[in-house]
């Protein structure tokens, strides 16, 4: 009886240790591998600071994430008219040909509604010294460079805050 139990035990171990003839699942894609060439969405995270001594602004791209996917509606690119003190994020190809632009409110200047002392609803602008903000948009295939500019008095009069190569690590 002992030999039968040992024989069953060894047979079970032998069957478990046998190599399967099934093909294994495909290897996982490396984190650094290029994302497939389908529709892609880009998330851009920025930090902007006001230098009150020099009266200048400085922007930094904190990070960017590119992922496969398609936005149902690209709200970020719908705004057409640029006003003074807005920011423009532009997307360029390798030859610095403009692909698209996104106009957004300046994150250091927030307009809020508040109730005044006499009970009336008023608006007030708050000026921050630093802020973080994000842009989410559909990424066009040829996009290599992004810029972030502040509009001064007209949409043609701008200050460059940032230029970044998306292909550069």
Image (tube, grey):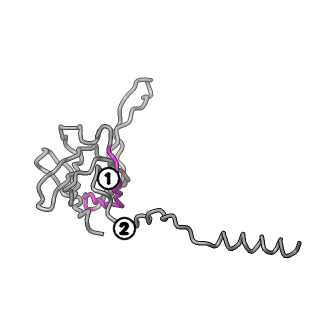
Question: Where residue 161 appears, x then y in whole percent?
Answer: 23, 58
Magenta stretch encompasses residue 55: yes
Question: Neighbour class for label 2 at 10 Å: few (<14), some, many (≥20)?
Answer: few
Asked if 83 appears above or below 150 in the picture, the reply is above
Q: Which residue is mark 2?
A: 32
Question: Dot 2: what SS?
Answer: loop
Please provide percent x and percent y for residue 3: 84, 76
Query: Distance between the Cα atoms at labels 1 and 2?
Result: 16 Å
Quadrant in the picture for residue 86: top left
Q: Residue 107: where, in percent of width, then height?
A: 33, 47
Q: Relative to 43, is 163 on the left or the right?
A: left
The answer to whether any part of residue 96 appears in the image is: yes
Residue 79 disc label? none
Q: Residue 42's mark? A: 1
**Going by the image, does 147 lie left or right of 66?**
left
Q: Sequence-wise, which precedes: disc 1 or disc 2?
A: 2
**In the depicted view, which residue is nearer to us: 73 or 146?**
73
Residue occupying image coordinates x 26% and y 68%: 168
Label 1 or label 2, whichever lies nearer to me, is 2
Most foreground residue, 87 or 12: 12
> As drawn, which residue projects farthest toward the right?
1
Which of the 4 image quarters holds residue 62? bottom left
Q: Residue at x 29, y 59 (%)?
A: 59
Quadrant of the image occupied by residue 142: bottom left
Q: Give the residues in magenta.
A: 54-70
């Amino acid at each position: 009886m002992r030999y039968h139990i040992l024989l069953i035990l060894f047979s079970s171990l032998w069957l478990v240790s046998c190599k399967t003839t099934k093909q294994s699942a495909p290897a996982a894609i490396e984190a650094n591998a290029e994302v497939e060439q389908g529709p892609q969405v880009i998330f851009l995270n920025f930090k902007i600071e006001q230098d009150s001594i020099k009266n200048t602004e400085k922007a930094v791209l904190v990070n960017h994430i590119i992922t496969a996917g398609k936005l149902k509606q690209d709200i970020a690119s719908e705004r057409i008219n640029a006003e003074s003190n807005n920011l423009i994020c532009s997307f360029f190809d390798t030859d610095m040909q403009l692909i698209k632009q996104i106009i957004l409110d300046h994150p250091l200047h927030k307009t809020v509604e508040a109730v005044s002392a006499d009970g009336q609803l008023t608006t007030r602008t708050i000026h921050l010294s630093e802020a973080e903000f994000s842009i989410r948009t559909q990424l066009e295939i040829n996009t290599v460079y992004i810029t972030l500019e502040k509009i001064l008095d007209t949409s043609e009069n701008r200050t460059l805050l940032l230029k970044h190569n998306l292909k550069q690590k």
